[in-house]
Each structure stands twice: as C-alpha cells, then as structure tokens.
Image: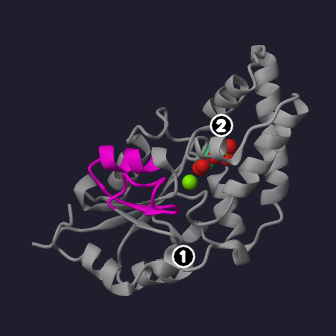
Amino acid sequence: MKEKKGVIFDLDGVIVDTAKFHFLAWRKLANDLGFDFTEEQNEQLKGVSRVHSLQKILKWGGMKLSEEEFQHQMDLKNENYLSYVNEMDASEILPGVSKILDYLIENDIPFALGSASKNARTILEKLNLLEKFHAIVDGTDVSKAKPDPEVFLIAAEKLGVKPEDSIVFEDAVAGIQAANRANMTSIGIGDKTTLGEADYVFSDFTEIEREFIEKLLSKQRIK
Ligand code: BG6
Ligand code: MG
C-alpha cells in the first residue's frame, strides 16, 4: 500500500526571506553594544532560537549581560525585527513557493510548518498563508532547538505521517541536521556547499521541477 506522505516547511529563509530582517535586527543590537559580526557568522544564527542566537552573538562580542539586560536586549531585537515584518505582505512569498503549495493542495498532500520562530503565526498571517497549513509547529511548541529533530517529529505526528514519509524544506544547516536526525528526506534551499548534508539542494523553489516532487511523493522511498 502506498504510504501517506507529508511535507514540512521551515519558515524563515524558505517561505519568506525574513532571514535578512533577523540579520539587520541582530546586527543593530551588536552595533549598539559596540561590536559587529559578519554575514558568515550570521549563517550560524539561521534556524537557531532567539535565546541561543543572543548567546552566540554576545560570545562573538566578548560580552556578558545580566539576566535582566539579556531579556531586555532580546525584546528590543524582536521589536526591531517586527517593525520589518509589519511591512510585509503576500508579495514577499519567495518565488516558486505558492506554486508548490498549490500543487500539494490539489493533490491532497498535507503540509505543516516546522519553525523555530515565535513569530511564525504573525508572519504567515501577513502572507495570507496561515489557513493553508494543516499544522503549525513553532518556537512556542518546542523545548529542544534544531538540530534536535523535535520540531519536525511533532509536525509529522500532527500530519499523521511517519517520519520516513516526511519531506522537509530547510535553509539552515541546523535544520537539515534536524531533518536527517528525524529520518526524514531533507531538501536544502540555498547554497550547495553550506547545505551539503542535505539529501538534495536547490538554490530556490523555481529550480525544483514538478517531476522531482512527483517522484518524491510517489510510493518509492528515496531514502
Ligand atoms: C528561525 C530563524 O526560523 O527562527 C532564526 O532562522 C531565528 O534566525 C529563530 O532566531 C527564532 O525566531 P523568532 O522570530 O522567534 O525570534
Ligand atoms: Mg530558516
């Protein structure tokens, strides 16, 4: 019998390019504290929770904050980040994403969101995508951050599909590792070298042919 397949999408950097807003907001925070970090360092923040991101950044700047100041800086960062998010609308959905979502809907393939962000619902609402997802698992639902597979395992469970029948789209190294650890098919969206651990990598969704998706969703397991 054909196993039921499901698809799980990361949000930031996959459905929408909010990764650039996270970078701008974190960089402002670092600059205000008197130091800077590079775009290469920023790669290490992708897929990483808000708390862990700030811990990493403070380490780069050789700084320590009191618990209260740490919380305050996280709040400031989020306020700044949301000022960008509030300007967003459906035109910011990344090229090729709507087409694949429509394909999944037409073919009755359930799909979920698996994101580390606590702002995920706000962003999906801005993009008019909130109602399309069969399940949403975000930073408010998980206790273990990617590369731990928790977020994707909960998403698959909510979709009613087995991990090995789940396909994950991710732009972050930590996210690809999480999908692999969950025994799911991992598809990297971004740079082939950075995301080398993924089962497949595409620079964006416009590169993905319909035949590829059909094959992935067919009863043969690719992994
Ligand atoms: C991830 C992003 O999706 O969500 C990270 O890749 C971000 O950069 C994390 O830190 C948490 O997001 P938020 O919106 O809860 O601060
Ligand atoms: Mg991401």
C-alpha distance separating marks 2 and 1? 25 Å
* Mark 1 element type: helix
Left or right of residue 136, residue 46 in this image? right
> On the rendered image, what quadrant is the C terminus found in?
bottom left
Camera-side residue of 76 and 177: 177
Q: Which residues are magenta?
A: 175-199
Task: Judge whether residue 74 can be spotted in this image.
Answer: yes
Give the number of the disc on residue 212.
Answer: none
- Residue type highlighted by circle 2: Arg
Dot 1 corresponds to which residue? 97
Camera-side residue of 216 and 131: 216
Residue 56: percent from the left, percent from the top?
Answer: 64, 29
- Relative vertical location of residue 18 with respect to residue 126 in this rendering, above or below: above
Q: Residue furthest left?
A: 1
Please name the residue shown 74% across and 38% down the image: 37
Q: Quadrant of residue 98?
A: bottom right
Q: Is mark 2 within 8 Å of ligand 1?
A: yes
- Relative vertical location of residue 113 with respect to residue 174 in this rendering, above or below: below
Residue 187: percent from the left, percent from the top?
Answer: 39, 62
Residue 179: percent from the left, percent from the top?
Answer: 36, 50
Queried whether the magenta region covers residue 194, the answer comes back as yes
Camera-side residue of 153 and 21: 21
Give the number of the disc on residue 50.
Answer: 2
